[in-house]
Amino acid sequence: MEYFSYHTHTNYCDGKSTAEEMVLRAIDLGLQSIGFSSHAPLPAKEPWSMDEILLEAYVEEIEELKLKYSSEIDVYRSLEIDYIPNVTASFESFKAKASLDYTIGSVHLVKVNSNDEFWFLDGPDTNFTHGVEVLFNGNIQKAVSAYFDQVIEMIATQKPDIIGHIDKVKMNNKGRYFSEDEKWYTDLLDKTIIALKESDCIVEVNTRGIYKKKSSTFFPDTYFLKQCLKYNIPVTISSDAHHVDELISVFDTAQEMLKNIGFDSVRVFEGDTWCNLPL
């Protein structure tokens, strides 16, 4: 099977490698395509997101790399765009402004009621704990429900091409606050599946949690992916690379898992459209 990488970060945001370093390593690894997806600028700058003043340079550099390496690899331009209701800009506005080939939609910051407080569920465990204990008063069901409700609203209103690490809310839980087989949690997963089957969104199998040793399972894992297969929801594989050495990390393991579940293809981007690539 051919390799590809559509969810990659560079030093325009929290990545550790330059865009050209990523392209050169991708060529060395034999990738057919690479897509850049730096964290889109946010209204209030976060240390992991791109600064608004860098967006024009980002667009220009990826365009230059497309042309420079066109005979060796397909290069695409995207952004991983965060969705916060009534806070972030629309995905369509980013797509137009940055001439994006496709979009990745993710939720890293969960809006807490109508306040200006946000639960940052990524990064150190302390962020997760603070959100549950302080922002949601120890109510884990309310916290996790708020996350999935925001994801579902993003699917319905923003219609991203790819949904990034759709159940990442589990990453820093590690069995402390809830078990992933509890009915209220699987009900939330099922609710999200219903939203997905009514959309054209692709679910990524994100491998980063495993190779960074932050999770023992993929985002998402077997239960969710079996539901995707049941309802014909397309999937792709993403390493969420932040360094050249991560471009296809645990890719083969994810591929085998999908085959074992029953998938016979994954979605890949070719030219200007998504196609099925046999596993």
Image: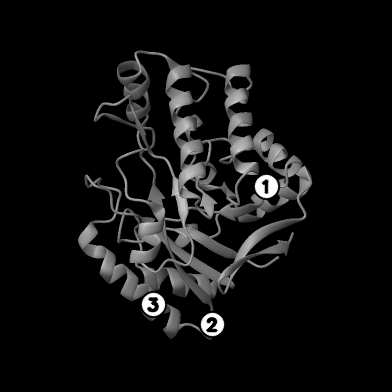
Task: Measuring from the top left, give residue 126's x and y in whole percent.
Answer: 33, 27
Q: Does 233 sit above or below residue 141? A: below
Task: Choose the circle earlier in sequence order: 2 or 3.
Answer: 3
Residue kind at label 3, given as amino acid type: Glu
Q: In which quarter of the image is the N terminus?
A: bottom right
Q: Mark 1 points at which residue?
A: 233
Q: Name the residue under label 3.
A: 63
268 lies left or right of 172: right
Q: In which quarter of the image is the C terminus?
A: bottom right
* Secondary structure beneath label 1: loop
* Secondary structure beneath label 2: loop
Task: Choose the circle earlier in sequence order: 1 or 2.
Answer: 2
Q: Which colour scheme is used?
A: one colour
Task: Measuring from the top left, give residue 213's x and y in whole percent.
Answer: 49, 39
Q: What residue is at 67 percent from the left and 40 percent from the top?
A: 225
Q: What residue is at 36 percent from the left and 59 percent from the top?
A: 94
Residue kind at label 2, given as amino acid type: Glu
156 lies left or right of 109: right
